[in-house]
Amino acid sequence: MRRILPYILYILALAIEIVRVLLFTYIEKAQPWPLSIVDWAAFVFLCIPAVFFFLLLQQEKYFHRLLRMIAVIKFLSIIAAWFFLIKTARFVSITDWTADMFILQTRITRLFLYIDTVILVLCLKRERSLCK
């Protein structure tokens, strides 16, 4: 059971990352402004952890250093999510964008803040146990 648990967590994390990318594209499609180069870069950045988790599923021992990189990405995404919430709140206050869409976005962003924090801690803990 102990050997299977990390792979179950990797599969769960891979599914979470795929859902995040799909939600990002759905929400960005519904916004009234056009996508900028920053939005496209964020989309590519969102795909990276999913690829890393897929590699970890293939050979955990060989790719265990990716856990540190995932932890850094998760740390940066937590910071980026807070900036996103602040920016979106300012944008909504000066436009006639619907409140329902804002509420949906903030709830999803806050949900992923908690998920990212859990993934960050689990990645650091797993990486530490593999280095021993």
Image (spheres, helix red, strand yellow):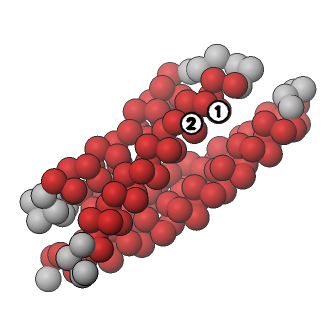
Q: Is residue 123 above or below residue 16?
A: below
Structural crowding at the residue carrying mark 1, measured as other residues with C-alpha within 10 Å and reported as few (<14), some (14–19) or many (≥20) = some
Residue 24, disc: 2
Name which residue lies at 28% across and 70% down. 6
Q: How far apart, in angstroms, are the residues tagged by discs 1 and 2?
A: 5 Å
Mark 2: amino acid: Phe
Residue closest to the eye, 67 or 50? 50
Structural crowding at the residue carrying mark 2, measured as other residues with C-alpha within 10 Å and reported as few (<14), some (14–19) or many (≥20) = some
Name which residue lies at 13% across and 58% down. 59
User: How far across and down, in percent of the image, does residue 93 sit?
Assistant: 88, 37
Q: Is residue 25 above or below residue 69?
A: above
Looking at the image, the residue that sits furthest to the top is: 34
Residue closest to the eye, 72 or 49? 49
Q: Identify the image quadrant of the C terminus.
A: bottom left
Mark 1: amino acid: Ile
Name the quadrant containing residue 60: bottom left
Q: Identify the image quadrant of the N terminus.
A: bottom left
Looking at the image, the residue that sits furthest to the front is: 1
User: How far across and down, in percent of the image, does residue 69 sit?
Assistant: 29, 56
User: How far across and down, in percent of the image, does residue 2 sit?
Assistant: 24, 81
Residue closest to the eye, 121 or 72? 121
User: Is the C-beta separation of discs 1 and 2 under 8 Å?
Assistant: yes
* Label 2 secondary element: helix
* Label 1 secondary element: helix
Q: Decide if residue 25 is on the left or right side of residue 86.
A: left
Name which residue lies at 56% across and 36% down. 24
Q: Can the viewer see residue 124?
A: yes
Name which residue lies at 29% across and 44% down. 51
Name the quadrant containing residue 68: bottom left
Residue 27, disc: 1
